[in-house]
Image (spheres, helix red, strand yellow):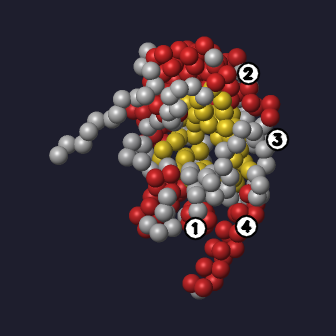
């Protein structure tokens, strides 16, 4: 029995038009990304949220916008994220999600050009399509990198992201998909994938970022497998501002390190 095709997007042209006429209804939340060696917040990921009917997932909005409105929605989200730099804590970076199609658009390139220096910005390519268009994407990234931006490749470890994308795009960050991170402490196959991606990232001078770490056991596992950065509910939930979290990241990481040390002593 054949599987059904993808469901139609609930986002219509009318809802997109409403959003573009009232851009303040696109808001951002920020999720901390923790440095697992120091226990400090290394940066934040800017996450787009839409206060427009239908209340669909961000991916649905950007997918719909890509059909006939290439770059407009991406440019709006990028502009909002760049404006938020003024609240970015010293020494932290801000990861800005963007589709490869959006990156190639004139609207997005102009938005970045108007921003001046991009030293604290990480351009996070949010689709596996980056691998299929690596040449064009690399060329579009060149002026952003010249202005100081760094690059993150999302969805690593999924079927859609080929390892040659890491070679072609040379990202500074390789983000390990939540689907691989979930249950990594209990699944030797997933652990092998995470370890391979962490080693590949290190070989190319990049850092591996574990996405969607929701349990302390997953945090302990990715640390043991060589991952140096992580984000997820086990560390901090997204919030409307780049504020400190209720429980310090350092404490969470320290707990994971203590648990890992106890496990190693028992094994010895």
> Could you tell me residue 96's position as x and y percent?
63, 34
**Along the polypeptide, which appears first: circle 2 or circle 4?**
2
Instruction: Check disc 3 and report the residue beneath it.
Output: 90
Alpha-carbon span between mark 1 and mark 3: 30 Å
> Mark 4 or mark 1: which is in front?
1
Mark 2, Cα crowd under 10 Å, few <14 / some 14-19 / many 20+, is few
> Mark 2 or mark 3: which is in front?
3
> Could you tell me residue 177's position as x and y percent?
49, 49
Instruction: Check disc 1 and report the residue beneath it.
Output: 217
Question: 235 or 99, which lies in front?
Answer: 235
Mark 4, Cα crowd under 10 Å, few <14 / some 14-19 / many 20+, is some
**Along the polypeptide, which appears first: circle 2 or circle 3?**
3
Residue that sits furthest to the front in the current view: 53
Classify mark 4: helix, strand or loop: helix
Classify mark 3: helix, strand or loop: loop
Q: Which mark is residue 254?
A: 4
> Could you tell me residue 258's position as x and y percent?
69, 74
Question: 49 or 174, which lies in front?
Answer: 49
């Amino acid at each position: 029995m054949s599987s059904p095709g993808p469901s139609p997007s609930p986002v219509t042209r009318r809802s997109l038009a409403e959003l573009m006429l009232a851009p303040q209804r696109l808001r951002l939340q920020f999720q901390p990304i923790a440095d697992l060696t120091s226990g400090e917040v290394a940066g934040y990921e800017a996450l787009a949220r839409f206060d427009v009917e239908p209340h669909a997932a961000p991916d649905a909005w950007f997918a719909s916008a890509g059909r006939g409105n290439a770059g407009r929605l991406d440019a709006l989200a990028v502009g909002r994220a760049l404006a938020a730099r003024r609240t970015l804590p010293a020494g932290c970076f801000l990861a800005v999600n963007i589709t490869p199609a959006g990156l190639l658009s004139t609207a997005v390139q102009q938005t970045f050009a108007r921003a001046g220096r991009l030293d604290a910005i990480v351009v996070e390519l949010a689709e596996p399509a980056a691998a299929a268009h690596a040449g064009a994407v690399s060329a579009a990234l060149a002026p952003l990198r010249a202005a100081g931006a760094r690059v993150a490749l999302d969805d690593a470890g999924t079927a859609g992201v080929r390892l040659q994308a890491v070679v072609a795009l040379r990202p500074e960050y390789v983000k390990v998909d939540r689907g691989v991170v979930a249950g990594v402490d209990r699944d030797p196959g997933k652990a092998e994938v995470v370890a391979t991606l962490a080693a590949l990232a290190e070989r190319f001078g990049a850092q591996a970022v574990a996405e969607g770490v929701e349990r302390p056991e997953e945090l302990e596992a990715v640390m043991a497998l060589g991952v140096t950065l992580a984000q997820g509910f086990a560390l901090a939930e997204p919030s409307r501002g780049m504020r400190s979290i209720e429980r310090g990241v350092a404490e969470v990481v320290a707990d994971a390190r203590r648990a890992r040390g106890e496990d190693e002593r028992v094994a010895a």
